[in-house]
């Protein structure tokens, strides 16, 4: 059986609710999964509070994907097995999601100034119940309104860093994220190192408290995967991997189960729930 340790729900920029995602993961025959929404643990909380955790037939690892502050690079840090009710973690995450909301308004204003008649309501219809609003929602709304042919075009032309509608948002520093994850009882893992495009920075991050590396990732070439597996050995790190499933039409993977990792990696991270 196979596993997937990176996926998003409606609580951030995914299309499926936590409940739907768990059902889809079961249907795909996954053994271990982790929900890793951007800057929020609301999806995990929903499963706990609906009595859907733990579940028969699938092992769920509570997770999160933090956006870390860096001047020029986009650095994401995954946290597995965190205590989602840790007070400091909740407070710091509140600051980040609040900042995402002000940034969302600022971006819509910029987009309107560029001549696209996009309203906050258009984006909110896409974002639905998400608490962690992102460029991903804005991109989907721009495509739905017919302003761009694809999500990729929206990023290439206006949403990417350096493009005219880009606004950054408040993020925590990598060191603080690593500390918060550890203090919440979790394991910090460097997400998709290949997307950082800076191996010096990758090594620097790995030397500063990170305990795992997401070596197995859809956008990594075979050479990159080998390189990150070697770094995992060098720094004695756990190896993780996942599909970064969002359920967004046109975005790989189209289905859960298309990109998976060996259960053995996930088993290293998994902890039996204390209930
Ligand atoms: P944010 O965290 O609000 O800056 O938004 C980043 C999100 O947008 C990521 O989590 C991705 O899901 C999505 N994203 C970023 N770049 C692209 C891209 N070039 N094409 C499609 N989606 C993207
Ligand atoms: Mn995303
Ligand atoms: Mn990411
Ligand atoms: Mn992700």
Image: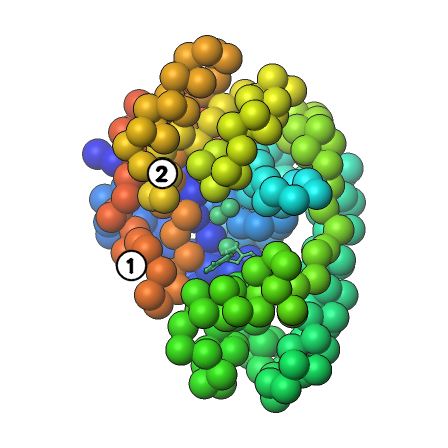
Taking depth in this image into account, of 271 and 6 the one nearest to the observer is: 6
At x 65%, y 64%, the residue is 166
Residue 229 x %, y %: 37, 21
- At mark 2, the secondary structure is loop
Residue at position x 57%, y 36% in the image: 77
Q: Which residue is label 1 attached to?
A: 254
Q: Secondary structure at mark 1?
A: loop
Q: Residue at x 36, y 30 (%)?
A: 224
Relative horizontal placement of residue 274, taking residue 253 as reference (left or right): right
Q: Which mark is residue 217?
A: none
Q: Quadrant of the N terminus?
A: top left
Give me the C-alpha separation between circle 1 and circle 2: 18 Å
The answer to which image quadrant residue 117 occupies is: bottom right
Quarter location, residue 187:
top right
Q: How has the structure been colored for display? A: rainbow
Determine the image quadrant of residue 105: bottom right
Instruction: Tell me if residue 72 comes above or below residue 158 in the rendering.
Output: above
Residue shown at the point (47%, 45%) measured from the top left:
35
Q: Residue 215 in the image: state x and y as whole percent.
A: 40, 30
Decide which of 89, 116 is in the foreground and name it.
Answer: 116
x then y, percent, for residue 191: 50, 36
Question: Do we see residue 49 in this rendering?
Answer: no
For the image, the number of numbered tags is 2
- Local crowd at mark 2 within 10 Å, few (<14), some, or many (≥20)? some
The circle on residue 220 is: 2
Q: Is residue 75 visible?
A: yes
Q: Is residue 114 placed above or below 56 in the rendered structure? A: below
Q: Compare marks 1 and 2 and give the one earlier in the sequence.
A: 2
Q: Nearer the viewer, mark 1 or mark 2?
A: 2
| Mark 1 neighbour class, 10 Å CA radius: few under 14, some 14 to 19, many 20 or more | some
């Amino acid at each position: 059986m196979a596993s997937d340790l990176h996926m998003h729900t409606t609580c951030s920029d995914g299309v499926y609710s936590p409940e739907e995602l768990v059902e889809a993961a079961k249907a795909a025959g996954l053994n271990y999964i982790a929900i890793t929404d951007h800057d929020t643990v609301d999806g995990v909380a929903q499963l706990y509070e609906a009595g859907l955790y733990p579940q028969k037939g699938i092992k769920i690892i509570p997770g999160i994907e933090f956006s870390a502050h860096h001047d020029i690079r986009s650095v994401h840090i995954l946290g597995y097995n965190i205590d989602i009710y840790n007070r400091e973690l909740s407070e710091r995450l509140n600051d980040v999601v609040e900042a995402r909301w002000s940034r969302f308004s600022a971006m819509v204003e910029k987009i309107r100034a560029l001549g696209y008649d996009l309203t906050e309501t258009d984006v909110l219809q896409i974002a639905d119940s998400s608490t962690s609003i992102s460029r991903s929602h804005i991109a989907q709304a721009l495509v739905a309104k017919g302003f761009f042919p694809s999500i990729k075009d929206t990023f290439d032309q206006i949403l990417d860093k350096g493009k005219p509608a880009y606004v950054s948002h408040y993020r925590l520093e990598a060191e603080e994220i690593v500390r918060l994850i550890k203090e919440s009882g979790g394991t910090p893992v460097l997400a998709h190192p290949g997307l950082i495009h800076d191996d010096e920075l990758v090594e620097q991050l790995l030397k500063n408290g990170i305990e795992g590396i997401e070596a197995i990732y859809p956008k990594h070439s075979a050479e990159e995967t080998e390189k990150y597996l070697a770094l995992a050995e060098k720094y004695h790190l756990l190896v993780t991997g996942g599909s970064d499933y969002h359920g967004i039409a046109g975005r790989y993977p189209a289905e859960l189960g298309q990109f998976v990792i060996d259960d053995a990696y996930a088993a290293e991270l998994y902890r039996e729930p204390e209930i």
